């Protein structure tokens, strides 16, 4: 069973063509068909033009002086042909493009809804039961609608294997839908340059086998229910994206490391000194710009209204635990 799943994952990551990753959603095949049709039409057009060009070069090369009245000025049949034929080709491309676009923009009724939040430099996925994850988990053979927003700048959510992509914009909700057709792991990535760690805003879409998504959801929920505050805080530290800038092992990052941070004395940008305690951590999460440690830029987004008091307490307990042992 585990071996079959691993093989399926490996296959879904490596199958595909020269131009495309594997097709893993209901719209992928139609999208690729249109792309290949336009591609081969362009190749045929290019070859045709180059052959005609070479032929005319040789056939009508200057073999001596010709009188001006010999030269043809126009040919109505030829001009109508090269105008009308491309018009029909363009109409066909537009038609298939439009119908495909309408399909991709219209989520089926009863689609499973997952919230997506982009923030520098992390994605958080929120399920109907409140569970939050760093990777996107979805069921196979079921339409999923993503309701997406950003906490700071414009990001863009792209799943190449599904052939779907949508901008994620602060101050509004954008949506996008897909129906995964093959269980496995697929890469998603941010495709809007959003700052220093734009390259790091990627992760996996885990497409669960039939029934697997529901049991995964139950398992995550019961694990969370039985977790200690430190475990819960550690999980939030990952899903909220703190880990993108704050290391927990002492290695340098865009923000101070949280290894042995609790109880540490720090100098602030205004020259004053503080000792990191519960209140400083709390303030630095809800309003990070208030007291910035000297040598760092105030780049962290404010989490005011985004974390509950209970979650804040768990995060504080987790940071405290990094100062023990
Ligand atoms: Cu987010 Cu690039």
Image: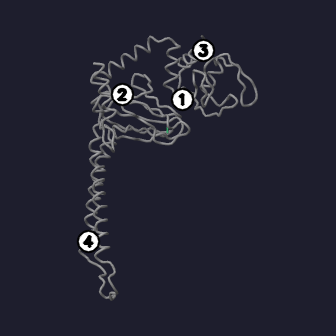
Residue 318 placed where, x, y %? 56, 16
Please tell me whether residue 299 is drawn above or below residue 61 in the rendered image. Answer: above
Residues under numbered marks 4 and 2 in contact, where contact means CB atoms less than 8 Å apart: no
Where is residue 292 drawn, in percent x and y?
67, 29
How far apart are the alpha carbons under marks 3 and 2?
A: 32 Å
Measure the C-alpha gap from mark 1 to mark 3. Answer: 19 Å
Q: Mark 4 to mark 3: distance in Å?
A: 78 Å
The disc, 1 or 2, on the residue closer to the chain's N-terminal end is: 2
Cβ–Cβ under 8 Å for marks 3 and 2:
no
User: How is colour applied across the structure in the image?
Assistant: one colour
Q: Nearer the viewer, residue 137 or 64?
A: 64
Label 1 CB-ligand 1 distance < 8 A: no
For the residue labelled by badge 1, is the local secondary structure a helix, a strand or a loop? Answer: helix
Residue 244: image tag? 1
The verdict on label 3 being within 8 Å of ligand 1 is no
Q: CA distance from mark 4 to mark 2?
A: 53 Å
**Residue located beneath label 3 in the image:** 320
Q: Label 2: state its secondary structure.
A: strand
Of the two numbered discs 4 and 3 on the same chain, state the one appearing first in sequence: 4
Question: How many numbered discs, if any?
Answer: 4
Q: Is residue 150 left or right of residue 5?
A: right
Q: Which residue is mark 4?
A: 80
Which label sits on residue 206? Answer: 2
**In the displayed structure, would residue 73 be above or below residue 257?**
below
Q: In the image, 282: left or right of 7?
A: right
């Amino acid at each position: 069973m585990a071996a079959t799943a691993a093989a399926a994952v490996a296959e879904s990551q490596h199958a595909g063509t020269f131009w495309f990753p594997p097709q893993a959603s209901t719209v992928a095949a139609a999208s690729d068909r249109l792309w290949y049709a336009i591609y081969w039409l362009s190749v045929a057009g290019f070859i045709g033009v180059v052959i005609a060009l070479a032929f005319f070069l040789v056939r009508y090369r200057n073999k001596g002086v010709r009188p001006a009245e010999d030269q043809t000025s126009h040919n109505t049949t030829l001009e109508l042909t090269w105008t009308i034929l491309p018009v029909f080709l363009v109409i066909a491309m537009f038609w298939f493009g439009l119908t495909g676009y309408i399909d991709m923009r219209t989520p089926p009724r009863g689609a499973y809804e997952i919230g997506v939040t982009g923030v520098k430099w992390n994605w958080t996925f929120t399920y109907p039961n409140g569970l939050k994850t760093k990777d996107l988990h979805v069921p196979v053979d079921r339409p999923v609608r993503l309701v997406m927003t950003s906490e700071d700048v414009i990001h863009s959510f792209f799943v190449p294997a599904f052939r779907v992509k949508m901008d994620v914009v602060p101050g509004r909700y954008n949506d996008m839908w897909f129906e995964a057709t093959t269980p496995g792991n697929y890469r998603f990535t941010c495709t809007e340059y959003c700052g220093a760690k734009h390259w790091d805003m990627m992760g996996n879409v885990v497409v669960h086998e039939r029934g697997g998504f529901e049991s995964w959801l139950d398992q995550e929920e019961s694990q969370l229910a039985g977790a200690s505050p430190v475990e819960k805080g550690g999980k939030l530290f990952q899903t909220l994206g703190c880990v993108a800038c704050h290391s927990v092992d002492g290695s340098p990052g865009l923000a101070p490391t949280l290894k042995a941070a609790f109880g540490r004395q720090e100098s602030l940008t205004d020259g004053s000194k503080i000792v990191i305690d519960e209140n400083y951590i709390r303030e630095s999460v809800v309003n990070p710009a208030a007291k910035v440690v000297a040598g760092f830029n105030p780049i962290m987004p404010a989490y005011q209204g985004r974390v509950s008091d209970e979650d804040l307490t768990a995060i504080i307990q987790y940071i405290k635990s990094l100062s023990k042992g």
